[in-house]
Structures are given as structure tokens and as C-alpha cells.
Image (cartoon, helix red, strand yellow):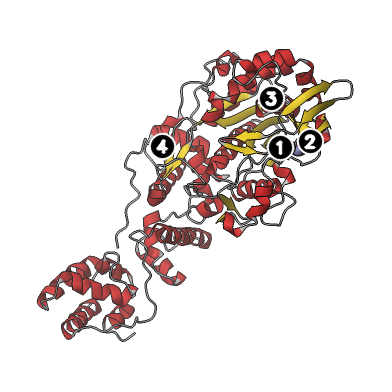
Amino acid sequence: MSDDSPHTDSPHDDSPHVLSTRAVGSADETSDEGVEAGEFHAFWADEVADIIEAREPDEPIVIKGGVSPSGVAHLGNVNEVMRGYFVAEVLRERGYEVRQVFTSDDKDPLRKLPRKLANADGEIVGLGDVDAGALGRNLGKPYTAIPDPFGERESYAAHFAALLQADADRLGVPVEMISNTELYAEGAFDDAIRTVLSDLDGVRETLSAYQDKVDDSYVPFNPICGDCGKVTETVTAVDLETETVEYACTDMTVGGDVIAGCDHEGTATFREGKLPWRLEWPAQWDVLGVDFEPFGKDHAEGSWPSGVDIARNVFGVEPPVPMVYEWFTLDGEALSSSAGNVITVPELLELLEPVVVRYFFALHPKKARDLDIARLDQLVDRFDRFERAAAGEVNDEELTAFAERAYPFVAGEEPRAERVRLPYTFAAVLGMVDDPALREQLARDEGHIQEDTPAWAVEEALERVERARTWAERTDNEYNYRLQTDLPDVSFEDDVAAALDDLAAFVEAGHDGEAIQSEMYETARAHDLEVGEFFEAGYRLFFDDTQGPRLGEFLGELEREYVVARLRREA
Ligand SMILES: [Zn+2]
């Protein structure tokens, strides 16, 4: 049977461009960190760790990510989890205590209905599967004040945070989720809010360099309406003595839509509201003592520059070391849960081993990448090559340098000498077979499993088969066939039946797959049959289908007795 050997079309595609020569963070602010060009590193996370270390941070070093509760926790969120994780692990290896936190912007209002949601198992569902009416009635309220659409957790925000936490757990990343709502409730932001509201002119001046809507009536604080519970935008007075603001619950415009306010006028304490995002982000850095934060390009162009300015000039703190990561696409298109172009971590882990997913995010964050589900075999091949390089089995200096450094962080251990990795496409071929013993036998016949391969290695190798099979099903590719254990309900014309009997005799005599494959052409010709018709008869017998893999070669791998009996329509 054909085994697309694990060659790599362009071995340099993924590897040594992990060797960046410039400091991390395209944002200008890194250039004045005073970090020396520094030692050359094979793994980008070491470069980032150097920059953090050079600032002589207090312990624990805090690495932060952030997430806005939306409908689906997707791979973009995972990107941020994993980038922070590799830097955290490098720092831990260097002897530092590190805390990796993820803030959920859960005091933000729900501005529009998500089109898709992920349930507790990470499965994507439409609004029709939940109480969408309840969501609609809660537009404008903080995520933490909105019921969980699945009725399981205390709020929409808690449901979403649990999804992200579960994804991190599945990938073996210890992340501490932090609720913004809770930080406000505890008073963690009291000082920041007091600072902002004490110097409105200064804050407005700083913000106006970045935002158009800042005029001299703008108060960057959003109280929660005491009557309807929505996040409001109109503060009419500030009382620093009592630490309260006066507000009016006016309409909020979101895109072209209006979320109606209730016109209530009231008083709110500092803990009964929130800072707008541009101030909240730098306030988080201050409150949590953040030393490093990776973020996507959107922030790099938007709230990062203003955040740096506000951190230094309003809160008087240094912003964290930044790292702007490239977004990646899924099947060539931007990730979008509303457009349905999204894959969740549980879904991805049905196709890939966790270590392969971790590897994907260990590649350089500055390079845009596409996760091409149809060609996951290529990604897995690259991982396998990376692993072999880590074991010193690949003659590629750059890849080996990267792999030797990064592999232990990706896999959590050094490569094990006796491990077995079935090429992904070969695993997909084995996936056509249901019987685990037969799968193993085929892998042995093909030389992937040796006489002395330990049981654990056999077991782990065969785990890839289920994933490759799921891949074949999901993409309905050329591996999506099932070997039929029982004889399908078929009947053939006499000439086809006679040809099948001849082929049975040929197989019985003992020939390898290639010989069987060419004999099928001979047999068809001898019986004056269309070749396609004869192959179709074979596919019906073995797969109960009209097409399939290279049949002769496939049959050559199967138990001879079974093949002969099936060709004779006996079993
Ligand atoms: Zn209101």
C-alpha cells in the first residue's frame, strides 16, 4: 500500500525562520528597552525571555493574555495561551517563578448576539440550540450579568472562561483565569479609577492622540445602570470625595444598531462600573504587575500604543514587554465563528495529537501561518521531522538547533528512542480498517513496528490511526473508506464473477500488492471488462463503495485467506 513517505516539500518552511535576528515586538516600545542585540537563540521564546530578564522583574514574573468572551473559544485564543506558555516555561527553566494569567474582559457589555456558541464540550452550536431570547434581552449588560445560555454556569462569562480553561488544560498549559468583574468587585481597580477621574484633562489629552471621540465632556468611566443593569456611557458628574459618579442611562450605538438605555439617572461607586478598554488594559498591567503580554496585530495598531502612553503618563508604570504575533488563517481564510470558519480545540484534538498542536504554536510567532485541515498530513510530517531532528536523526543544522532547544518545551520531555510515529497518511490508510489487531499487523508488515518495539510505543503509534481516520471522515478525502468485515450484499454479472475468481486464484498463489495491482488490469482485459468496472466490483466487495484506495496494493497488505474468500464472495 502506498505510504506517502514523510518527506517534506520544503524543510525550511517552518523551521529555521524561528531564528529571528531582531528583538521581539514590532512595536516601537521594545527598541528603548535597552536590550542588547544579545545572544543568538534557536528558539524565539529564549529571545523574549532575555528581554524580560533584562528588566530584572520581581517574582513571580507575570505573563498575561486576554480574552473577550465571545461565542466560541477558538484557535486565536489558543495562540495567545501557547505563546505565553513557551515564554513562561523558558523562564521557569531559568529558575524563575512564573504566573501565567488570562484576563477575561467580562465586565464588557454584550454588544451583539453571537451567531455561534460553543457548548461545554467545545462543540459549536447555533443560536437555535440555546435560549437566544434571553441573550437578546441582555444586550448591553456585562457578560457576567448574563445567564449562561446553556444553563450550566453562573453566567455567560463563566461559561466562556470555562471553555478557555478547558482548552488550556487539554493542551497541558497551566493558566490562571482572572475575571475583570471580580477585580472590580474586589476594588483592585479603585486606585486606577481614582487616578483617571482625578486628572480628566490629562487623560483626555493623552487619549485624544489616539481616539477621535474624546472631547472635553468625555469621562472615561462606564457605570452599570442601577435600574436596567446595562453598561452606560454618559457620566454627568464625578465626586472624588465619595468616590462616586452621576450618570444617565442613555442609548448605546453599536455599529449601526442602537441598544436602548432606560433613561435612569443615578449614582454609581467606582466598583459599580468599569474603565473603557484603552484604560482598562494598562490598568490591568499595573494591578497584576504584568511583565510580558503577547497580542495580535489589531492591538498593535490600536490600543497598544495608547496603552503604553497611558501606562507611563497616567498610571506611572512601565508597560510589559510586548510581543505581536501574526494571526493565522484556517484553510486560507480568516478565522470567523460567524462565517463558520472556525475549529475548536476539542475538534482539533480529534485530528492531531496535543504535542502536534503545541508544536504548531512553537513555530515563530512572527510568521503568518495557515492551518490547512485538508493537508494536516503535511503539518504532522513536519512535526515528525522536528522530533527526529530533536533526536539528532536529521541532517539539517538549523532545524536541529531549533528542535533540540524547543522540543522539550513542546513535548515536555526529550524524544524517546523507541517511539514510533506512523506517517499520518499511512495512519489514514490503517483507519480504513476497524480491527485494531489488523491495524497493528499492517503497521508491522510495513516495517513501522519492529519485533522489539515496546508495547507503549505500539499503543501510542496506533492512537494516531483514530485521528487520521477522523480526518479522512471530516475532509472526506481519498482515505475515507471502510474495509467491510462482512460480505456486502452484492451480485455480479457472470463475466465479472469469473474475473474475480481468477483474481482470487492469483492472490491465493501468493503475490505482493504491486503484483496484485497489475494482475487486476490483466484479469480485466482477459475477461473483456472495462478496467474501471472490475475495480468497482472490488471496491463493492471490500468497501461497499464504488471507489477506494489503490486496491491491489491494499489487498496485498491484508490477510490472504480473507482476501481470497471475499473475492470468491464466500465471506
Ligand atoms: Zn438603565
- Picture layout, residue 452 above or below residue 191: below
- Judging by the rendered image, the residue that carries numbered circle 1 is 261
Q: How far across and down, in percent of the image, does residue 129 sit? A: 59, 59
Image-quadrant location for residue 77 = top right
- Judging by the rendered image, the residue that carries numbered circle 3 is 279
Closer to the N terminus: mark 2 or mark 4? 4
The residue mark sitting in front, 3 or 4, is 3
Q: Please state which of residues 392 and 549 is positioned toward the viewer in this rendering.
A: 549
Q: SS for tag 4?
A: loop
Residue 264: mark = 2
The residue mark sitting in front, 1 or 3, is 1
Ligand number 1: quarter of image: top right
Answer few, some or many: residues within 10 Å of disc 4's Cα (few below 14, many 20 plus, some between 14 and 19): some
Label 1 beta carbon less than 8 Å to ligand 1: yes
- Picture layout, residue 131 above or below residue 225: below
Kind of residue sitting beneath label 3: Leu
Closer to the N terminus: mark 4 or mark 1? 4
Task: Report if residue 59 is visible in the image.
Answer: no
Q: Distance between the residues labelled 2 and 1?
A: 8 Å
Kind of residue sitting beneath label 1: Gly
Specify whether 37 is left or right of 225.
left
**Residue furthest to the right:** 242
Q: How far apart are marks 2 and 4 (CA)?
A: 57 Å
Answer few, some or many: residues within 10 Å of disc 3's Cα (few below 14, many 20 plus, some between 14 and 19): many
Marks 2,1: beta carbons within 8 A: yes
Q: How far apart are marks 1 and 3 (CA)?
A: 23 Å
Q: How far across and down, in percent of the image, does residue 301 sit? A: 53, 24
Closer to the N terminus: mark 3 or mark 4? 4
Task: Report if residue 87 is visible in the image.
Answer: yes
- Taking the spot 86% from the left edge, 25% from the top edge, the residue there is 243
- Judging by the rendered image, the residue that carries numbered circle 4 is 14
